[in-house]
Amino acid sequence: MADSCLLAKLRGLVGEAGLISDTDAMDPHLHDWRGRYRGAARCVVKPASTPELAQVVALLAREGVPMVPQAGNTGLVGGATPDASGNAVVINVSRMRRVRKVDAANNSIMVEAGCTLREVQDAAEAAGRLFPLSLAAEGSCEIGGNLSTNAGGVHVLRYGNARDLTLGLEVVLPDGRTWDGLRGLRKDNTGYDLKHLFLGAEGTLGIISAAVLKLFPRPRASAVAWLGVGNAAAAVDLLGRTAFELVVKNIPGVRPPLAGGHPWAVLVEASESLAGFDLGAELEESLMAEIESGLVADAAIARSLSQARDFWRLRESISEAQKIEGFSIKHDVSVPVSLIPNFLDRADAALEAAFPGVRIVAFGHVGDGNLHYNLSNPLGEANAELIGRSSDANRIVHDIVAELGGSISAEHGIGQLKRTELLRYKSEVEMEVMRTIKSALDPWGLMNPGKVL
Amino acid sequence: MADSCLLAKLRGLVGEAGLISDTDAMDPHLHDWRGRYRGAARCVVKPASTPELAQVVALLAREGVPMVPQAGNTGLVGGATPDASGNAVVINVSRMRRVRKVDAANNSIMVEAGCTLREVQDAAEAAGRLFPLSLAAEGSCEIGGNLSTNAGGVHVLRYGNARDLTLGLEVVLPDGRTWDGLRGLRKDNTGYDLKHLFLGAEGTLGIISAAVLKLFPRPRASAVAWLGVGNAAAAVDLLGRTAFELVVKNIPGVRPPLAGGHPWAVLVEASESLAGFDLGAELEESLMAEIESGLVADAAIARSLSQARDFWRLRESISEAQKIEGFSIKHDVSVPVSLIPNFLDRADAALEAAFPGVRIVAFGHVGDGNLHYNLSNPLGEANAELIGRSSDANRIVHDIVAELGGSISAEHGIGQLKRTELLRYKSEVEMEVMRTIKSALDPWGLMNPGKVL
C-alpha cells in the first residue's frame, strides 16, 4: 500500500487529531528522552479509545506494517523508539487517558494506558486510597508504559513492582483482536495467567490498552531517617556510597543530614496505616539499638515533612548531580540481597584494576537488591576514553552479576539497549521459550520489532 | 513401543524404587482423594532428581506417551488424575524433596517440588523466617502442586497467592529440556516473565521441578477475634453465614465464641512483626469502635493461644461438618470484594426460587472476595434430587458470578472438573490465546492432556 493510501485509511480510523505525519511534529516521538536512540516512522497514530486502537492494529497487521507502541516515552532502553528504516508506524496511547472506574471498596481502579502515573496516583488519592507506584518520571510517564516495562521505583520493597500492582489487563493483540482481561479479582485460578505475559513484555506481544490496578489504604503516618554506616559487609541491607557527596557538592541548597565522613548512607522510610501507633518513636528506638550494636554509625531522623523532603531530594538528585560531572556508564543490576557486599567487593576491585582511578557511584534500592552502579571518570580527565570502553566496563560488571545469579536489567528493561547483552546472559533454553511465545502470538513479527528479542 | 519395553527403559532411568507398575501399588495415584475421579495408567514413575525427571519426560515425549504430573495429589478438581484410557504415565515428584538452599539474608528458600508444604514452612521456621502459604492439606500437599495450582489458603490477604510467593522456578519442559529460572531476585526485567506462565498452569505446559520462594520476618505478635454481625450489606468485608452453626452442631467440643444468634460471623487474625506494639489492644480498640458504629454486633477476642486455636478450629471444620450432613454442591468463586453482598443477595434469591428450602453454607476469605458458596439439602430430604440437579445449581451460581466480573474458580483451579464450564465463561479470544500458548509449548499435546483446556 502506498504511504498516502495507508495514511488516509489511518486518518479515517482516528481522525485528523489522531494522526501526525508532519516531520517536525513527529520528532518528539522518534527519539528517547535521553537522546540516545533516534529512528524514523511513516507516521504517528494516536487512537483515542480501545476500539480505535484495535482497528489501527488490525489495519497495520493486514498491511504487514511494523508497529512501535509508545506511551509517555520516558524509558531508558530505547524500547519505544522505532528503527531507522522508516517502515514502522508509532502507535502512541497518550490520548487514551480515561479513569474508567474507581472502586474504593474493592481497592481497585480501572484506567486507560495513556493516563500519566501521577493522574492514577491522584485519582486514587481522591478516593481516599493509595496507588503506590512512584518513580522520578511520574509526572510524564504513562501507566501503559509502566506496565509494559514492569516499572519498579521507590516503593517496591513494601508494595512490589508494577506487575504486582496489576489485577487485570485489556490488551490489543498483534492481529487487532482485543483481549478483555479487566478483572478486579484477588483470586482467580481459571487457566493461564495471561496478564503476566504482557506485563514487562515491552510491547512485543501486544499493546496494553487499559488495566485494573490495586489500591491500598493511605498510610496514616510515615517516618524518614538518614543513616551513616561504615561498610557494606556489615550492613547487607544498607547502601548509598559516594552518591550523596556528589549531590551535596553539585546541587545548590542540599546539605548532608549528618556531619562526619560516613562512606555509606541509607535512606529509610517507614509508613503505617494503623492509628494509635507512634511510628517515629518506633523508628528512633530501632535505630538507637542499631547504633549501639555498631551497625549504624550515626542517624538523623526527619523532624518535619520538609526535612523528610530534603532527605528524599538528596536521593533523587543523584542522577542530575552525576550528569553535571560529565559522562557516566550506567548499570541497572540486581543480585540476591545477601550478595550485595560480595558484588560490590568484586566489582569495585575488577573496575579499579581495569580503569585506575575510576569513580564508582553506587546507589539504589537496597531492600530489593537493585543497584544503580555507575562509573564516572576520575576528576579532570577527559570522557573520551571512558566512553570508548563502555562495553568493557559493562562486561566486567555484568559477568560478576551473572555469576552471582543476578539480573543485568533490574527495572529498566531490555529494549534496544541490552538486546545483544541478553543473549550472553540468558540460557539458550530460556531464549528459545521466549522466541516460541513471541512467534506464537506475533507470527509476523510486526509488534515492536527489534526490541527485547 | 510395547509396554514392557517402555517400563524397562523407565526403570533404567529411575531405578526399581522409582517405578510402580503393580496395580494395587498404583491405586493411590490413580484417583483424587475425594474419590470423584478415577483413571488408569501404564505405570507411575517417581524420579528422584531433576535430571532423572528430565530424562523421563524426554523419553516419553519421544515415544509420544501422555504424561500426568502429580505431587501430593490433594487437589479438588481432578487435575492430577489420568483419564481412563490407560495410555498415560503418571509422573509423581514426591521423591524430589530436598531443601536445596535457605538464604535468610535474602529472605528466600530453594526447594524441590516434592517437599510437603509443611516441610517448607518448617525449613523457613528453622531459619527464623516465615513461609506464609498455609492451607488445610499442608501436611500432605507438596509445593510443586501448590505452585502448579497457584494455591490460595488463609493468608492471601496479607501475603498473596502461591504465585506471589515465588521468585524463581525450574521447569522440565514437555520435550524434556530443563529451564533453569531459579533466580532469587526481587527485581528482574529481562524479557518475558516465564515463571508466571507455569505457575497455575496445572502441569499442562511442563513440570515444575524446583522453586525459589519468598520468606518473611516471623510475626512477633498476633491477635485473633471472632465477630458477630447482622448483615452482609452493612459489612462488605465480613463473612461466615450459617457455616459456624453447622460446626458447633457436628464437631464435638467446638463451642460458639459468642452467645446470641448472629446470622454472620467473621474470624479476624492480625499479626505484626514490629516490637513494642500492643496488637491485642489495637484490635480491641478498633473492634470497640466498630461495635459503637453498629457494624459489628458483638466480638470475642481470643485471650490465649488455645482460644485462638479454638476459633480457627471452628473455621477449619466447616467442610468436615458439612460432609456429615450429606452431599453438598460446592462452589469456589470470587467476585470483587465490593460486590460480595450483591452476589449473595442475588444468588440466595435465585437458589431459593429454584431449590425451595435449600441450605446455603457460605464461608470463605472475605478480604480476597473468595467465597465457598455451598448448597446442602433441606434437613431430612434425600440427596438424590440435589445430586441430579448439580449442574442447574452451578449454572445459577456461575452465571451470577460472571455477570459480576467474578471467577468460577478462585483457588482450586480447573483440572477436569470445570473444563467445560470454562468454555462458557471465558471469552473466545482468551481461550484462543491460551490454546496458542499450549500448542506452542506442547505441540504434541502430551503434557497433562484433558486438563484446563
Image (cartoon, coloured by chain):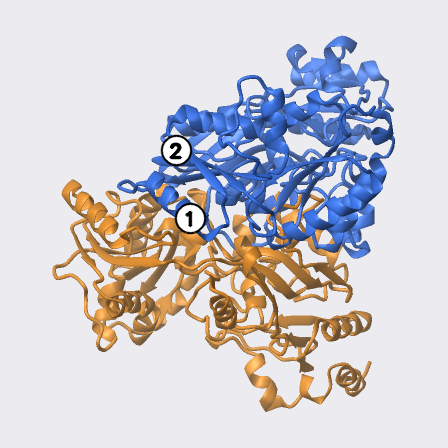
Chain colours: A blue, B orange
Q: Are marks 2 and 1 in contact (CB under 8 Å)?
A: no
Residue at horizontal 61%, vertical 74%? B98
Residue B135's spot in the image, x, y percent?
43, 66
Q: Is residue B386 left or right of residue B431?
A: left
The chain containing the residue under callout 2 comes to: A
B399 or A135, which is in the foreground?
A135
Residue B308's spot in the image, x, y percent?
27, 65
> What amino acid is labelled 2 in the image?
Arg
- Residue at label 1? B401
Q: Secondary structure at mark 1?
A: helix
> What amino acid is labelled 1 in the image?
Val
The chain containing the residue under callout 1 comes to: B
A254 or B298, which is in the foreground?
A254
Q: Quadrant of residue A137?
A: top right
Q: Which mark is residue A129?
A: 2
Residue B381's spot in the image, x, y percent?
26, 72
Residue at horizontal 76%, vertical 9%? A24
Residue at horizontal 65%, vertical 41%? A371
Query: Quadrant where the C terminus of chain A lies?
Result: top right
